[in-house]
Amino acid sequence: MTLPRLVDVPSSPLDRPARADAVPSSPDLSLGRMVETNGGSSLEKVPGFDTARARNAGLFPRATAMGAASLGVDGFALENMIGVDNLVPVPDTTSVPWRCVALLSITYEDGIRATGTAWFMSAKALGTAGHNIRHPEHGRATEILVSPAFDGSTAPFGTYRVNQTYCDPAWLNGNTDAGLDFGVLVLDDNSVGLRLGWFGFAAYDDRQLNKLLLNVSGYPMDRASRTQHYNGGRIDDVGSMFLRYTFDTVGGMSGAPIFALFGEQRVVVGIHTSGNDRSNRARRIDRSLYAILSRFAMA
């Protein structure tokens, strides 16, 4: 009888089997496969966060139907909270990866001031939502300030004025197609990102994204202390242009990274933009959006 041999570990973290290096070797050994999640991603460890709820929700179909949607032309508004608020504050925003997430202080052309979220994707470029750059109601942003790791009272790494913005020209000129709701912010100084670090990002296929555990962190505007808050859970639905999920986000978190955690690598797969009373939504990083983000990340 020929014993099964151990196969080589694939290079992709999404297809990587359980590690065997901690298991004592034997000629009579058959490795099990017991993984916590589809796709190999993990949840961040944040005090007070209910990982059991997030890990198990969506793993199997829901037993009861959800209520009807109530918001927006396409069923989505720019922000929404679903049911119970499961967001938890990040206790130390100066640690990785939280220091790579920034509070945006935005002034629009009609004089309205607002906040949003962005994430470093290179030494001086940040990904965000398009409506942080041109809002459907308030017009174009005339000033955007970036405060990495803002902790509710101070900006531990300083505040920087955005030197260049990019969003789709159609969005900039008034088109409200949700598929165009993405943007890039560029700082003048690359020393900021070089000191803090940045997220990876990727255009994964449907199979790789299906039921993947994801993380989100940003700056909700409804908190007395405007500090960074975290949530996470599984992808509920993978569409050609959008990722949908039922873990909560609220106003101010638009532009936040929707990211997977593979070991020590954090890979953004979507940009949070909107939600309704049933799910929240990110603009999926598909191949076309990946090409746009890469152009600025490598500049």
Image (cartoon, helix red, strand yellow):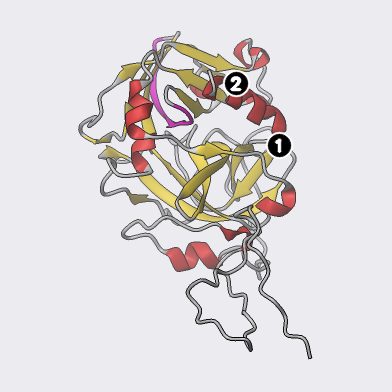
Please give the range of residues in magenta: 111-122
Q: Is residue 119 magenta?
A: yes
Determine contact: label 1, label 2, CB under 8 Å. no
Q: Which residue is mark 1?
A: 241
Query: Which amino acid type is shown beneath numbered disc 2?
Result: Arg
Q: Which mark is residue 295?
A: 2
User: Is residue 263 among what the camera can see?
Assistant: yes
Q: Is residue 214 left or right of residue 113?
A: right
Foreground of the two, 68 or 171: 171
Query: Which amino acid type is shown beneath numbered disc 1?
Result: Met
Badge nearest the viewer, 1 or 2:
2
Foreground of the two, 295 or 225: 295
**Residue lying at 38% horizontally and 20% vertically, measured from the top left:** 190
**Residue lying at 35% horizontally and 56% vertically, measured from the top left:** 46
Foreground of the two, 249 or 148: 148
Residue 182 sits above or below residue 256 on the image: above
Give the image quarter of residue 178. top right
Q: Is residue 295 magenta?
A: no
